[in-house]
């Protein structure tokens, strides 16, 4: 797993990358009540706003961590957004992306570095 | 350095794992480890304990007793204070010359005095207002008592076991009961739509009392986050959001709080700030109105969302003043102001969220029917 400073995790699965937010981020956001996912087939550039999540507190954007094409989204979150709080690094994933430049992952944090990052 | 004030229970909130935020100048818990959603549901299912000590408690007295105090208060609020029976409380609002709301408050007839509870953010101004405009009255801010709210269907059972006599009170009754934690000033009321109590306790006894309540299986501490979603489901206004100096009680759909005796044709009609505007408005209805809104999707429409009559184009018809997800109704909910022509329940209007207009239906308030013991 790789981690971004935006508190996303990326897991390489065959030729796509699964993206979600960390347990730390989910806890900070509080109970998540709404998730708006991108359309499958959308071409995104790193730092594009791709997902909107609303918690009991506020709305937040999830940014694309890498360039590529959205190839699958987790439809389950539309009906059960609290899955993100319950299982952030498992069933609470947001989307899968086919990355156009995997080298963008090189600078991302590993688990140890992320733990240090969140202190 | 922080300039935030604290309540006497600040250390207890921290010990309980409260996440502290600034609110109305106070350092207050927005949530505890249970989280907003579960705290909300727990309060509706069992009982929740809230620290509302930041609110202002004030006693008003006069040489002429209650009649004199009530007459003086009626010069500041459009509410029947003189007719309030001993041991009863009611909702009121301070108005300004434009008919706008300077604060909303509870007034209670307690023996020969008036006991008043006002919002934290307005209390200094309210005390000044009463001092300046209630001649002959003594305005006595209550400085050494904390205020708790115990709300939910099990509140009565929990409190009666600790403070015999609490269970016999009805909705909007007030009483002073002696207890193991000193004299408690109780009112059977709250701001969640649930049955329950607000309890004024001596500051040096309140932590012990709060711990005794929290030791009960039915009771969990509840933060400001759930307090907000509970009051919004109950259709209740938050001062500074849903009502303010620029909104009148009629526009705010609070006309029910203005009794007949203070309206045109009543025995004590008018005589409060803004009466020349409010009395005709009670008849005409005013140009805009506070309504409930149920968005059709799952996305909440938050405070500030601009409202339109049509899916595209057209002028704005109003604004959302509170919006959140309702854990008990399992749907997003909002309150806001719309043009009176569009205020009928069932009317479809549109809120602009992230550049897109989303449909919402005007809905009757409360979203969640109240559970009071009348």
Image (cartoon, rainbow, N blue to C red):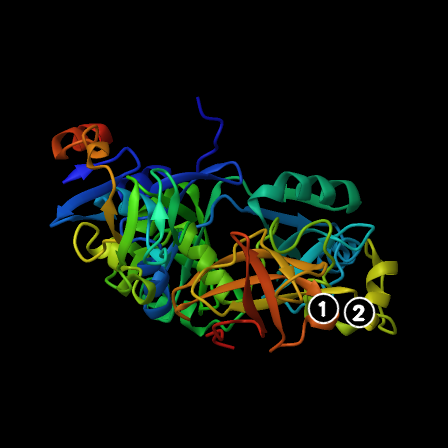
Q: Is residue A9 left or right of residue B315?
A: left
**Which element is circle 2 on?**
helix
Q: Earlier in the sequence, mark 1 or mark 2?
A: 1
Point 77% across, 40% down: residue: B132
Q: Nearer the viewer, residue A51 or B250?
A: A51
Point 35% across, 48% down: residue: A43
Give above or below for B367 relative to A37.
Answer: below
- Disc 2 marks which residue? B282
Q: Nearer the viewer, residue A47 or B13?
A: A47
Callout 1 environment at 10 Å: few (<14), some (14 to 19), or many (20+)?
Answer: some
Separation of residues labelled 1 and 2 (CA atoms): 7 Å
Asked whether disc 1 touches disc 2, contact meaning CB atoms under 8 Å apart, the reply is yes
Q: Is residue A41 left or right of residue B137?
A: left
- For the N terminus of chain B, the quadrant is top left
Indicate the position of residue B311 as horizontal and vertical percent values.
Answer: 61, 66
Q: Which mark is residue A58?
A: none
Q: Nearer the viewer, residue B319 or B202?
A: B319
Indicate the position of residue B336 as horizontal and vertical percent values.
Answer: 62, 60
Give above or below for B38 relative to B13.
Answer: below
Callout 2 environment at 10 Å: few (<14), some (14 to 19), or many (20+)?
Answer: some
- Disc 1 marks which residue? B255
Give above or below for B86 relative to A68.
Answer: below
Q: Chain of mark 2?
A: B
Point 35% across, 40% down: residue: A45
**Which element is circle 1 on?**
helix
Q: Is residue B31 in view from this perspective?
A: no
Point 50% across, 43% down: residue: B54
* Residue B274 placement: quadrant: bottom right
Q: Is residue A10 in view from this perspective?
A: yes
Q: Residue furthest front?
A: A100
Give above or below for A92 relative to B7.
Answer: below
């Amino acid at each position: 797993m790789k981690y971004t400073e935006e508190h996303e995790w990326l897991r390489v699965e065959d030729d796509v990358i699964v993206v979600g937010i960390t347990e730390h981020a989910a806890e900070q956001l509080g109970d998540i009540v709404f998730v708006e996912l991108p359309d499958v087939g959308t071409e995104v550039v790193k730092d594009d706003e791709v997902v909107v999540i609303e918690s009991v507190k506020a709305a937040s954007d999830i940014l694309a961590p890498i360039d590529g094409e959205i190839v699958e989204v987790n439809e389950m979150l539309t009906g059960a957004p609290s899955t993100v709080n319950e299982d952030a690094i498992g069933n609470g994933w947001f989307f899968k992306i086919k990355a156009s430049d995997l080298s963008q992952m090189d600078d991302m944090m590993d688990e140890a570095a992320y733990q240090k990052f969140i202190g | 350095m922080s300039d935030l004030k604290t309540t006497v229970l600040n250390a207890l909130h921290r010990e309980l794992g409260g996440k502290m935020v600034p609110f109305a100048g106070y350092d207050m818990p927005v949530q505890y480890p249970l989280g907003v959603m579960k705290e909300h549901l727990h309060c509706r299912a069992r009982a929740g304990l809230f620290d509302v000590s930041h609110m202002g408690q004030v006693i008003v007295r006069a040489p002429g007793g209650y009649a004199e105090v009530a007459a003086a208060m009626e010069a500041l609020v459009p509410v029947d204070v003189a007719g309030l029976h001993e041991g009863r409380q009611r909702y009121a609002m301070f108005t300004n010359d434009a008919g706008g709301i300077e604060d909303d408050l509870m007034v209670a007839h307690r023996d020969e005095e008036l006991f008043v509870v006002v919002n934290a953010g307005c209390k200094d101004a309210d005390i000044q207002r009463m001092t300046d405009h209630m001649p002959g009255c003594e305005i006595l801010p209550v400085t050494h008592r904390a205020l708790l709210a115990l709300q939910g269907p099990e509140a009565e059972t929990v409190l009666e076991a600790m403070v015999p006599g609490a269970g016999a009170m009805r909705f909007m009754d007030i009483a002073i009961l002696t207890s193991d934690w000193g004299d408690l000033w109780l009112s059977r009321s709250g701001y969640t739509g649930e049955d329950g109590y607000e309890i004024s306790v001596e500051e040096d006894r309140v932590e012990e009392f709060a711990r005794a309540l929290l030791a009960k299986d039915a009771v969990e501490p509840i933060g400001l986050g759930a307090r907000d979603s509970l009051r919004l489901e109950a259709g209740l206004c938050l001062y500074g959001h849903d009502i303010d100096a620029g909104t009148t009680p009629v526009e705010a759909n609070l006309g029910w709080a203005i009794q007949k005796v203070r309206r045109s044709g009543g025995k004590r009609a008018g005589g409060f700030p803004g009466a020349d505007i409010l009395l005709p408005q009670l008849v005409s209805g005013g140009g805009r109105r506070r309504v409930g809104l149920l968005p059709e999707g799952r996305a909440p429409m938050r405070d500030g969302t601009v409202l339109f009559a049509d899916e595209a184009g057209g002028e704005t018809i109003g604004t959302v003043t509170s919006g959140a997800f309702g854990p008990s109704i399992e749907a997003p909910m909002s309150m806001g102001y719309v043009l009176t022509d569009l205020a009928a329940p069932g009317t479809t209007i549109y809120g602009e969220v992230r550049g897109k207009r989303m449909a919402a239906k005007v809905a009757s308030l409360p979203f969640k029917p109240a559970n009071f013991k009348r």
